Amino acid sequence: MKRVILTAICAAMVSAGAFAQTVDEVINKNITAMGG
């Protein structure tokens, strides 16, 4: 049971990291588009 919880936590961290990376890319594109 604990292993399932750990796997779920790891998956959540990976997806959260991927989401944060995507957000960073969008923000950087917007800054570049605005000439910042």
Image (cartoon, helix red, strand yellow):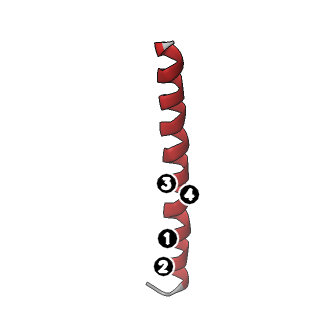
Residue at label 3?
20
Q: Disc count in the image?
A: 4
Mark 3 or 2, which is nearer the eye? 3
Q: Which element type, helix, strand or loop, lies under badge 3?
A: helix
Query: Of label 4 and label 1, which has the lower sequence position?
Result: 4
Q: x%, y% of residue 7? A: 52, 23
Q: x%, y% of residue 35? A: 48, 87
Residue at label 1?
28
Crowding at mark 2 (Cα within 10 Å: few <14, some 14-19, many 20+): few
Residue at label 4?
22
CB atoms of marks 1 and 2 within 8 Å: yes
Front one among 2 and 29: 2
Please report the residue visible at 55 percent of the width from the left and 83 percent of the height from the top.
33
Distance CA(mark 1)–CA(mark 2): 5 Å
Mark 3 or 1, which is nearer the eye? 3
Q: In this view, does 23 lie above or below 16?
A: below
Residue at label 2?
31
Query: Of label 2 and label 4, which has the lower sequence position?
Result: 4
Distance CA(mark 2)–CA(mark 4): 14 Å
Front one among 21 and 12: 12
What is the three-letter code of the residue carrying label 1?
Answer: Asn
What is the three-letter code of the residue carrying label 4?
Answer: Thr
Query: Of label 3 and label 2, which has the lower sequence position?
Result: 3
Crowding at mark 4 (Cα within 10 Å: few <14, some 14-19, many 20+): few
What is the three-letter code of the residue carrying label 2?
Answer: Ile
Q: Is residue 28 above or below residue 9?
A: below
